[in-house]
């Protein structure tokens, strides 16, 4: 079956530091990959997505590249801000429908 | 455009009771999915409905059920509540069943005492 593994947190960084959150997956076929963000007390928001190998998703300074050879979709940002503090979830969906398989989430804390 | 709304936002029940949660999708969205979020198990898919039909179901016991109405609003029901059912229940809507971006509601926080 499908599974997603992401690095455990919390990840604590100083403002303007470089961020990497690792994500690897196991899936049959050619899934679509996503990063969602959850701010305190809120639901999930789609941050970025990639639907095929070598695609790069990007949004709000965050980037992730779909690497089929390493089954990875690592999230990166060059300079984090305090407002980026949240929980980040890596997820995949196979092409059969809307069912998302999520990783365990990584809490990011950015200090001024 | 209004987002996904879920009611109630908070709920406290006791073991053995049943509960119904409601989700109103974004206007024009016909697919509604439900997820359970707990600290121990993370985010887990419950089921997906499209045009009043259940299309996918996660690995949950039969105590968890759902339905979708002709206006795309969806309800999920949990019968014979257990302590382990305490969770944040998230609803997400999408335009169709072929993967489209899913928009999540704020969730219903269920506490079972």
Image: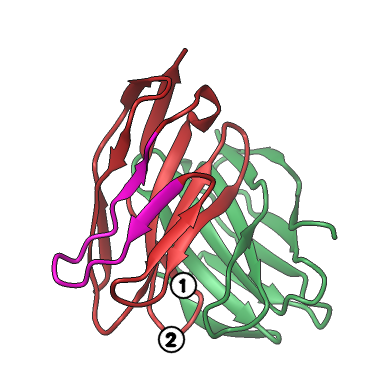
Q: Where is residue B65 drawn, in percent x and y?
A: 58, 69
Label 2, residues with CA under 10 Å away: few <14, some 14-19, many ≥20: few
Residue at (56, 36) in percent of width and height:
A39
Q: Is residue A82 left or right of residue A92?
A: right
Q: Quadrant of residue B61?
A: bottom left
Residue at (59, 66) in percent of width and height:
B102
Q: Is residue B7 left or right of residue B77?
A: right
Chain B on-screen colour: green
When the figure is inspected, residue A12 is found, relative to residue A90, above or below; the finding is above
What range is drawn magenta here?
A: A62-78
Which chain is home to disc 2?
Answer: A
Residue at (50, 32) in percent of width and height:
A84
Q: How many marks?
A: 2
Label 1, residues with CA under 10 Å away: few <14, some 14-19, many ≥20: many
Verify CB contact (< 8 Å) between mark 2 and mark 1. Answer: yes
Closest to the observer, A93 or B77? A93
Taking the image as drawn, is residue B84 in sight? Answer: no
Give the Cα separation between the discs numbered 2 and 1.
8 Å
Tell me the SS state at disc 2: loop
Which chain is home to disc 1?
Answer: A
When the figure is inspected, residue A33 is found, relative to residue A90, above or below; the finding is below
Q: Where is residue A92 drawn, in percent x and y?
A: 37, 67
Q: Is residue A89 left or right of residue B75?
A: left
Residue bearing mark 2 = A96
Chain A on-screen colour: red
Q: Where is residue B92 drawn, in percent x and y?
A: 62, 63
Residue bearing mark 1 = A99
């Amino acid at each position: 079956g499908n599974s997603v593994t992401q690095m455990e947190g919390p990840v604590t960084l100083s403002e303007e530091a470089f961020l990497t959150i690792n994500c690897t997956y196991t899936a049959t076929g050619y899934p679509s990959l996503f990063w969602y963000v959850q701010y305190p007390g809120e639901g999930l928001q789609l941050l970025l997505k990639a639907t095929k190998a070598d695609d790069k998703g990007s949004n709000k300074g965050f980037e992730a590249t779909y690497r089929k050879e390493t089954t990875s979709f690592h999230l990166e940002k060059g300079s984090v801000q305090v407002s980026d503090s949240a929980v980040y979830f890596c997820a995949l969906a196979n092409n059969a429908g809307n069912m998302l398989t999520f990783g365990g989430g990584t809490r990011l804390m950015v200090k001024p | 455009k209004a987002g996904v709304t879920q009611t109630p936002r908070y709920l406290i029940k006791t073991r053995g009771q049943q509960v119904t949660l409601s989700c109103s999708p974004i206007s024009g969205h016909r697919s509604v999915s439900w997820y359970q979020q707990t600290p121990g198990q993370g985010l887990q898919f419950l089921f997906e409905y499209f045009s009043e039909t259940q299309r996918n179901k996660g690995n949950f016991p039969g105590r968890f059920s759902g339905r979708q109405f002709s206006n795309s609003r969806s309800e999920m029901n949990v019968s014979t509540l257990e302590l382990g059912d305490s969770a944040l229940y998230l609803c997400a809507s999408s335009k169709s069943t072929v993967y489209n971006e899913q928009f999540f509601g704020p969730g219903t926080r269920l506490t079972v005492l």
